[in-house]
Amino acid sequence: MPPLIPQQPPVDPETIIRFEHVEKIYRMGDHEVRALDDVSLAISPGRFLAVMGASGSGKSTLMNLLGCLDKPTAGRYLLENRDVAGLDDNALSALRLRRIGFIFQSFNLIPQLTVRENIELPMFYLDRDSATGNRRALELAELVGLSDRLDHRPAQLSGGQQQRVAIARALANDPVIILADEPTGNLDSKTGRQIMELLVRCNAAGKTIVMVTHESRLAAYAQARLHMSDGRVDRVEEGA
């Protein structure tokens, strides 16, 4: 599989994510913060990339752009060869719902809903029928080892179980990309390893995964590690 290319990506129809000289500037009055500064990279389908860097290095901004939660100030972001900068808010929402799965450090489950209902939520927004939603929720609950917890609510689950529900929810609409932001940050080391092994299984099944982490031992699960500093790509390490 082609490696991640940190600068000046060539034209490649197999590239799922492409940044071309991307900048992101936040303006607060007369003050400018350049959160991303001339970032170019390309990621091929099925890669597992860890994004690392100190606080303020641009990791969160990069993830927000990748997840279509924000747009570049300059440069281009092509997702599956589509320039997302030209999409309106409704189109961006649809793109996120259909193509991207999110996993957060804080799980972001809805406490009033059961495990089944949390997993089904993305399918509800896509108007899937209830039978399809139920079937898919059961399949995913089995995948993450929670088929016996479908009627439990988040407060009745451990942190690791809640993160497993979050992963199942992220997979509900069969996204092509999974974005994971410190997915083991609130978990003990043993549970964190279990979550990472689950992400590796998702990647082995063909999902492209981009994960923010500050821990080298977790980044070692990825196929490549992108290090950021001052809004730029500092270096990319390939392999274990």
Image (cartoon, rainbow, N blue to C red):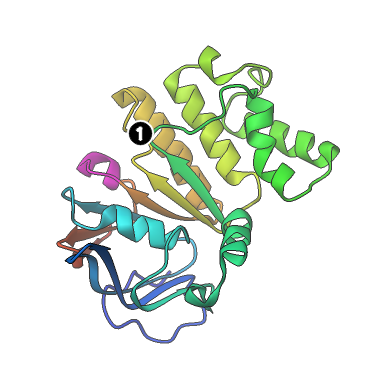
* Residue drawn at point x = 33 percent, y = 60 percent: 62
Horizontal and vertical percent for residue 234?
16, 66
Task: Specify whether residue 218 is in view.
Answer: yes
Camera-side residue: 52 or 91? 91
- Location of mark 1 (residue): 184
Horizontal and vertical percent for residue 179?
44, 51
Task: Specify whether residue 48 is in view.
Answer: no
Q: Is residue 108 left or right of residue 125?
A: left
The quarter in which the N terminus is drawn is: bottom left
Quadrant assignment, res 192: top left
Residue 70, relative to residue 192: is it above or below? below
Q: Is residue 188 left or right of residue 99?
A: left
Camera-side residue: 173 or 143? 173
Question: From which residue to which does the magenta span run?
Answer: 213-220
Q: Is residue 158 left or right of residue 32?
A: right
Are there few (<14), some (14-19), or many (20+) residues within 10 Å of tag 1?
Answer: many
* Residue drawn at point x = 56 percent, y = 57 percent: 96
* Residue drawn at point x = 59 percent, y = 39 percent: 169
Horizontal and vertical percent for residue 73?
34, 73
Horizontal and vertical percent for residue 67?
46, 58
Residue 151, relative to residue 223: is it above or below? above
Q: Residue type at mark 1: give it.
A: Thr
Camera-side residue: 59 or 134? 59
- Give the residue at the far bottom of this rendering: 11
The total of numbered circles placed on residues is: 1
- Give the residue at the far front of this rendering: 29
Q: Is residue 86 left or right of residue 20?
A: right
Disc 1 secondary structure class: loop
Residue 129, relative to residue 12: is it above or below? above
